[in-house]
Each structure stands twice: as structure tokens, then as C-alpha cells.
Image (spheres, rainbow, N blue to C red):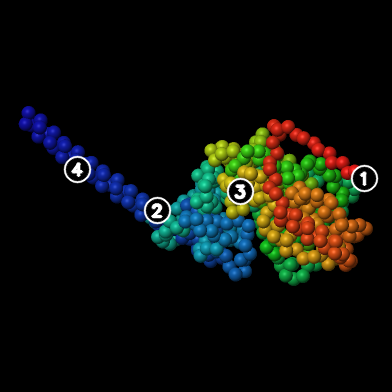
Amino acid sequence: MSTSLQLKSKTTRKSGKLKSAVSSATNSAAENEKECRKFRLFVRDRRSNLLFLVDSGADVSIIPATSQNKKKAEYLLYATNGTEISTYGIKMLNLDLGLRRDFQFPFIIADVTKGILGADFLHKYTSNLLVDINKKKLIDGITNLFVLGDITAISSDNVISTLNKSIKISNLLLKYPEISRPNLFPKETKHDVKHFIETNGQPIHAKARQPDPKRLAIAKEEFTFMLHNEIIRPSNSQWSSPLHLATKKDGSYRPCGDYRQLNAQTIPDRYPIPRLEDFHQILKETKIFSKIDLFKAYFQIPIAEEHKCKTAIITPFGLYEFNVMSFGLKNAPATFQRFIHEVLRGLNFVFPYLDDILIASKSNHEHVIHLNLVLERLNTFGLRINISKSVFAVEEIEFLGYLITPQGSRSLPDKVKAIMNYKRPEHIQDLRTFLGILNFYRRYLKDAAKNQALLHENLKGSKKKDKRKIQWTDEAEKQFEKCKNDLANATLLSFPNSELPLSFLQMLQIQQ
């Protein structure tokens, strides 16, 4: 019995030592893993001499901005603490990491101090690039070559994300990680929609325009970028349209074709674009709103192979044609509206207007369900969201020039202020501009036709850009000021309710 007890005691002591050893080893391994997570491998690109942090925790791959490329882009990145990081476009690089082959990848130019090879880069090359932290190696699984790097401890604050995790629905967006990553031109589209350019007549052609040296340099840079990203390709087409540099809101330029001749020969696509004010139809009894802005929406639609030649742009440095739908093409809006209607078909709580999408719900719980359905559809069709220009789960939202609230819609305060501060027009062209701005909100203005009649008298028989001076009378000036005040005093417009009875009133004017 004592022997048995003694044996049990020994076993217990051994078991205790074993458990202690296992626990110690486990804790040690956990600590080592925890410590390893603080360290990252740095490798250098031999062409640019840029040092890159290899970090799968970063959503995207980035390079530091320089004084030459600090032209702000329309999307933002975010640090772990929610701090916004400005971006300045995308640059295609061919990295030489010392592995006897190139690694071509589009990098986001950002306001950071070091380059990062993020999750998107590592995902593309995940089958053949291995990181060995302990031996400070980046190993190429294809060639079995490796390059030595530097190991440095980093803070978790260095993690770069395309998603601001402090926003209300960040957990929902995390279900679809690809949807918030900027992507100019997907190599594989997830839909079969294409843009067709049916034309009448013979191929049109034009001579190359010679822009000034500054614009020429910008055009060359943009075309090189689009060429590397397969947005365009070299062309030997019979068709050619001249280069046009459209000015964007931030003062930068967007190169596109001057397609006026091509558009004149293009057979129109009659697919309807919704009226701006039609969004009111989905807003009955809704209280929570979101607005989604799609990233580079047109570039998600390939052009039919047999019609790419018609998009050719002639420049002083070559002839190029588009692989994807470009701005300025006659039927591009109709093609995209048809596509986005197909993407969101059956979702009656959504109003898509080209690349802007409004989502309206009656409660927060319902809104989460609605958003999930929309994000799932967008992800299925390979579309991307511009997070920095989107707004989620709010009670008031600006959409297509209107302010939407649970009580109704009204004109935007800053637009009203601009009209109130509008100086009395000196020329007919200026008056036409004023009336155009004012009548964007015509549905909010009582007796608009009557109050504007005297001002419209000046437009009779005028040309589009008429520089003739207006002969103002006291009565006309009073009407001008009244039109501005009418908008300032415009009431809230309630949402229509199709379930309520409608009444029609006819006003009769009795002649004296």
C-alpha cells in the first residue's frame, strides 16, 4: 500500500513537473510570438532605393509622397487611432528586391515616412514570397533565392487601414475587406457588362493638339500611369479624337478625349437616368440614412473589344485607346446606370444615381440589414467604395444637392448662402447662370414662374454666351431680390406618401 502510495506520489510529482514545464514552454512560446509581432522585416528596392516595411497588418501597399507628387487624391487612409492619412494618387512600381525578378504593383502615394508592402501585395505574391523574421530573410518560393533585410520593432499605431474603424458600421465593412481598397482596374471583372459604341458613318479622325509644356508633362505622366495600369493601351486605330485635359474641382487635370465628333456619330442609348428629385420616392417614414460613393466607377466597365478602337486619343506622344469606359463618351452614363440598376435590383430602400447610392431605413436595426445587403451586392460585382466620401448611419445627410432629414428635404444651407450673396448680374450670360442655380431648387419655390417672369424677359432672343449688358429697372431689381429671399424662406418639403389620397386643385384666373 505504501509502495502504491509512493508510486502515486512520484507520478504526481513528475506530472506536476511536466505540467509546469509545458506551461512554462507554452508561456514562453506565447511571449516569443507576442514579441515577434512587435518586429517587422524591412527590405530595399534596388531601383528606387526605397526602404519597405513588410507588414501584412497594413491593408494596402504605400510609398511616401514627395514634393513633386503632393497632389491630393479623393480618398483617405487611416491609422489605428483613426487619424486621417492624405493620399496623392497611385504609382506603378517595378520592384527589384534582389530576387532576380521584378515585382510589379500599384502603390498608393501617401503622407507617410516609409514604404509598406501591405496585405494586398503579399496576397498577390502569397504563394511564392515567404517572410522569415528569425533569420531576417525574404524568401522567393519560385527561385528559392532569398534577400536579407533589417528587423525593427514597430508600434501597433503604424498599422495602415483603408477603413476608419471608429465609424459606426466598421464591423460590417470588415466583413468585406476588398470593398474599401482602392483599385483602379480589376484584372478580372466579376460581371459580364460591357460598353458598346455603335456608330453611323466613316471613322472620324483629328490632328494632335499641342498643349503648353506644363500640360504636356501632366498628360505624359497620366498616360504613363494609365498605360501601366492597363486602363489604356497603344493603338493603331483608324479613329482618333484629340486630347482634352478637363479641369477637376481641386484644380488638377483629368486627361480624356474630346469626343464631340465621335459622339455626333454615336447611336444614342435611351436607357433613362433618374431625375435628381426622384430619391424622394424611397424616403417615406425613413429616419436613418447612408450615402455610398463608388471608387472609379466607370473604370469597372470594360469596353467591348471590337469598339475599343473608337476611343483612340491622338497625342503628341502617340495614339492610345481605352480598355475601360472613359469620361466624355456619349452613352457612358446610360451604360453605368443600367449596370448599377442591375447590381441593386430588388432593393427598394436604395436610390442609385450613377456612382452615388442613397440608402434609407426606418430604424438602426433595419439600416444595418439594408447596408449588409447593399455591401454584399457591391462586393459580388467587384465594385469598390470611397470610404472618405461615403457617409453611414446618420439622421441628416446631403445627397445630390439636397439636405435629407426624417421630416423632409430642403435646399443646402451653403447653396442658399451662395445665392443670397449673388451680386446683381451685369450681363445676360450672368443672369442665365443665376436663374440656372436658383431653379435647381424650383420645386421649393412658390409661384416661381410668376416671380421670375420679368427676369426671363431679358433672355428672349439671347445667345448662349450673351455678353450684352442688362438694362435694370426698379421693378426688375425688386424681383431679383425677391427670388433670392424666396429661396431663403423656402419651407421643408415632406416626402410623398403613395398610400394617402391625392387631391388636385385647379386655379382659375378671372379676367376683369
- Read off the residue under disc 2: 37
Query: Considering the numbered disc 3 on the image, is that residue within a helix, a strand or a loop?
Result: loop
Q: Which mark is residue 511?
A: 1
Which numbered disc flags the more N-terminal residue, 1 or 3?
3
Which numbered disc flags the more N-terminal residue, 3 or 2?
2
Q: Are marks 3 and 2 in contact (CB under 8 Å)?
A: no
Q: Quadrant of residue 501?
A: top right
Determine if residue 501 is in view: yes
Q: CA distance from mark 3 to mark 2?
A: 42 Å
Query: Considering the numbered disc 4 on the image, is that residue within a helix, a strand or a loop?
Result: helix
Which numbered disc flags the more N-terminal residue, 1 or 2?
2
Which numbered disc flags the more N-terminal residue, 1 or 4?
4
Q: From the viewer's perspective, is the residue at label 4 or at label 2 nearer?
A: 2
CA neighbours of label 1 inside 10 A, class few (<14), some (14 to 19), many (20+): few
Q: Are marks 1 and 4 in contact (CB under 8 Å)?
A: no
- Read off the residue under disc 4: 17
CA neighbours of label 3 inside 10 A, class few (<14), some (14 to 19), many (20+): some
Locate residue 128, reporting x and y percent: 51, 49
- Please state which amino acid type lies under the numbered disc 1: Gln
Q: Which mark is residue 396?
A: 3
- Please state which amino acid type lies under the numbered disc 4: Lys
What residue is drawn where x is 82% and y is 63%? Answer: 477
Q: CA distance from mark 1 to mark 3?
A: 46 Å
Locate residue 43, reporting x and y percent: 48, 60
What residue is drawn where x is 76% and y is 44%? Answer: 275
- Please state which amino acid type lies under the numbered disc 3: Glu
Which numbered disc flags the more N-terminal residue, 4 or 2?
4
